[in-house]
Amino acid sequence: MRNQLIAIPLAAALALAGGCHFLPYRQEEAVDHYVQGQLLADQGKIDAALRELAAAVKADPDLSVAHSAIGDLHRKRGDYRLAERSYRHACDANPYAFRPHYHLGVVYQALAEAADAAKQVEDYLREAVGVYLRAVTLEPDDFDTNLNLSACYYSLGKLAVAEKYCKAAIAVKADSPEAYSNLGIIYDRQGRVYEAIKAYKDSLELDVHQPRLLMNLGATYMGQGRLNLAMRSFELATREAPDDADAWEQLGSCHYHRKDYDAAMAAYEKAVALDKTHAAAHRGIGVVYMTRFILDRGNVALRDKALAAWHASLELDPDQEEVLRLVRKYAPTVTGPDL
C-alpha cells in the first residue's frame, strides 16, 4: 500500500494545474466568434464582423488568425494604424504565421506613403523591411514579399539589396512585367543604363501596355542623347495614356531637344490642357517662347509670354531655382518715375 499511487479526482487535478479546465471551452468560444466574424465579413457587415472578432480575441488572446482577420478589415478600410496594431498582435501570437507578417509590411509601406516628414517615411520603411525579412524567411518563394522588400530597400537608397530581392522575385515569377520594370528602375538609378533598357524591354515583351515604363525608357534614351528612340517611347506612352499630362510633357521635352519647337509647344499645351496645375508643362511652354525670343530679339511679346508661363510654373512649384534664375535674367527692368 505504501507504493500505491494516490488517485486524485480529475476535476481537482485540473484545478491544481492552474485552472486549465477553462481553456478548451474558451478556445471553442473564440473559434465560434472567429467563424461568425468571417461569415459577417463575407456578407459585407464589417462592423458586426469586427465585434465578433473582438469577442474571439477576448476569449482567446492567442488566436492569431482572429487578430489577423481584424487587421485585414481595418486595412481594407484604410485604417492603417488599427491594422498595424492587430497584425502586431497576430505576429506576437504566432511568430511563424507568414500572412500577418506580410500584411504588416504592407501596412507600414502604406503608412510610409502617407507620411509627410522624411524621417517618418524612413522609419516606416525600416519597420516594413523588418517584418518583410521575417516573412521572406517563413516563405522564401513568395513573389509579393520579395518584390515589396525590393521596393522598400530602393526607397531607402539601398540599391544593391533592392536589386537582390527584385531578382529573387523574378526567379519566382519570371513572367512578371512589374518585376522587370522595377529592376530597370533600379539599374537606371545605379547608372547601369544598358541593363536598365534591357530590363524595360523585357517588361514590355510581357506587357506592352505600360505608359509609365515607356516614359522611363524614353527618359533613359534621352539621357543617352538617343532622341529618336526617346520620341518613339514617349509617343507610345501618349497613345497608351492619352489623358496623362506627364506623358505629353515628356514628349514636349523630347521635341524641344530635337529643336522641333512647334511640336514641343503643342505637346506642352496638351499637357496643360489636361492638367492646369502641371508646373513642368508651364515651364516648358516658357522655355519654347524664350527660345523663340532669343532667335527673334525684336519680338518682345515672345519674351513676355515666356515670363508669364514661368511665373505660372513658379506659383505652382516655387522650388525651381533654375526657373527663378531665368526670370531674373530676362525680366525687363522696371524703373520708377523721374522726380
Image: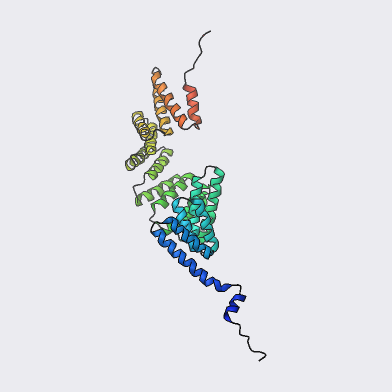
Q: Residue furthest bottom?
A: 1
- Residue 178 vs 235, above or below: the answer is below
User: Front-most of 67 and 163?
Assistant: 67
Q: Position of residue 304 (x, y in %)?
A: 41, 21
User: For this view, does 211 lie left or right of residue 12?
Assistant: left
Residue 76 shows in this picture: yes
Q: Position of residue 66 (x, y in %)?
A: 48, 62
Q: Position of residue 117 (x, y in %)?
A: 54, 42
User: Front-most of 96 and 2?
Assistant: 2
What residue do we see at 47% from left, 61% from top?
53
Residue 95 shows in this picture: no
User: For this view, does 247 lie left or right of residue 22?
Assistant: left
Number of marks in the rendered image: 0
What residue do we see at 49% from left, 30% from top?
322
What residue do we see at 41% from left, 60% from top?
40
The N terminus appears in which quarter of the rendering?
Answer: bottom right
